[in-house]
Image: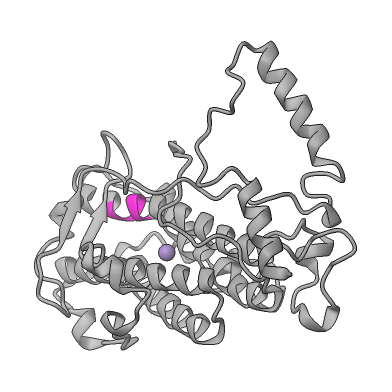
Amino acid sequence: MILRIDRIQMELPPPSTPDPAGAAVVQELFGGRFGEMSTFLNYTIQSFNFRGRQKARPFYDLVANIAAEEFGHIELVAATINTMLTGAGEPGDLPDPEKVLNPQQFIAGGAGTLPQDSNGNPWNGDYVTSTGDLVEDLTHNFFLETGARNNKLKVYEMVDHPAARALTGYLLVRGGVHQVAYARAVEQLTGADLSKLFPAPRIPTDKIPECRPHIERGDHLRLYRFSPSDYLELAAVFNGPHPETGEPLEVRDDAPEGFPPLDLPPQEGVFAPDYAPEEIAEIARKLRQRAGLSDEPTGVVADDGQSVVDKVKDAVT
Ligand code: MN3
């Protein structure tokens, strides 16, 4: 089972100037072959299929637990795309087709993320390798993280929207940890040091400004344990010095603290969440009252939504 926490793993900047063309490029990190849907579902399905898991527990715990972090990564990529599209779905103001690389984000979606790559191709189950052979699957995962970091760097270079830069900075650091984790797992099983054999991609994250805060916090060394009581055997595999910096790898016995998500404002021009969002808000208010809940919504968001609307309007005018 997955326990869901209503926070996101990193703080994202609020919406600024809408960037539908950039948002279509960022889709590659969501539904591309090397995107977060692929890492999430490769590790998830491998963990479901894992036979003899009790005797191989440290390896099972590693794959299952990284799968849980990847759920938070698809959530972050979607939050980034949706932030970049905010302001582009206002009534009478939908973007010029020439400035949009993926019109389906508006036509099929409500100025939102789709399970597609940067060309609008749907994510594909063929992107999952789950052979049941542990060495083969772990080696595949190492190269999946290699390709994923390669793609993240290209998206970083292609898209200069602040939300996309913040996202790729964070994911480059966390993907680096997962690459090290799979390399360590293969090394513990076979003796082959993948980090030395295949030192790719060469990404000097310490020179990328958006990576630096995460490195300074130590997030390039840590695996978090995404469960209050399970997956206790991670540290049996994930240990020793970081192959690039020599600092000790570390397992943290809790999920990252995370940040409240942005409450992105309605985009009435694409009926998200409706042509008249205030009607839905009024219905919800009455339901909340009837259920004996407080007048104020109980969930925590990074802003009240309205301030984001004002900021977007300021940026556009
Ligand atoms: Mn990831």
Viewer can see residue 175: yes
Where, by quadrant of the figure, is residue 267 drawn?
Answer: bottom right
Please tell me in which quarter of the rendered image ligand 1 is found. bottom left
**Residue at 58 percent of width and 68 percent of height:** 126
**Residue at 31 percent of width and 49 percent of height:** 256
Where, by quadrant of the figure, is residue 85 drawn?
Answer: bottom right
Q: Is residue 191 left or right of residue 37?
A: left
**Residue at 38 percent of width and 67 percent of height:** 170
The foreground one among 204 and 233 is 204
Is 68 in the magenta? no
Q: Is residue 279 left or right of residue 237?
A: right
Q: In the rendering, at what x and y percent does residue 83 appear?
A: 61, 61
Viewer can see residue 86: no
Q: Is residue 300 left or right of residue 186?
A: right
Please provide the residue range marked out in magenta.
62-66
Look at the picture and state if 282 lies above or below 137: above
**Residue at 67 percent of width and 62 percent of height:** 312
Q: Is residue 266 left or right of residue 91?
A: left
Q: From the image, which quarter does the N terminus lie in?
A: top left
Q: Which is the main secondary structure of the residues drawn in magenta?
A: helix
The foreground one among 8 and 232 is 8
Count numbered badges in the picture: 0
The foreground one among 54 and 252 is 252
Look at the picture and state if 314 lies above or below 296: below
Colouring used for the render: one colour
Q: In the rendering, at what x and y percent does residue 288 appear?
A: 66, 19
Q: Which residue in the rendered view is the most extreme toward the right?
A: 92
Look at the picture and state if 155 lies above or below 17: below
Q: In the rendering, at what x and y percent does residue 48 appear?
A: 43, 47
Q: In the rendering, at what x and y percent does residue 184 appear?
A: 19, 68
Q: From the image, which quarter does the C terminus lie in?
A: bottom right
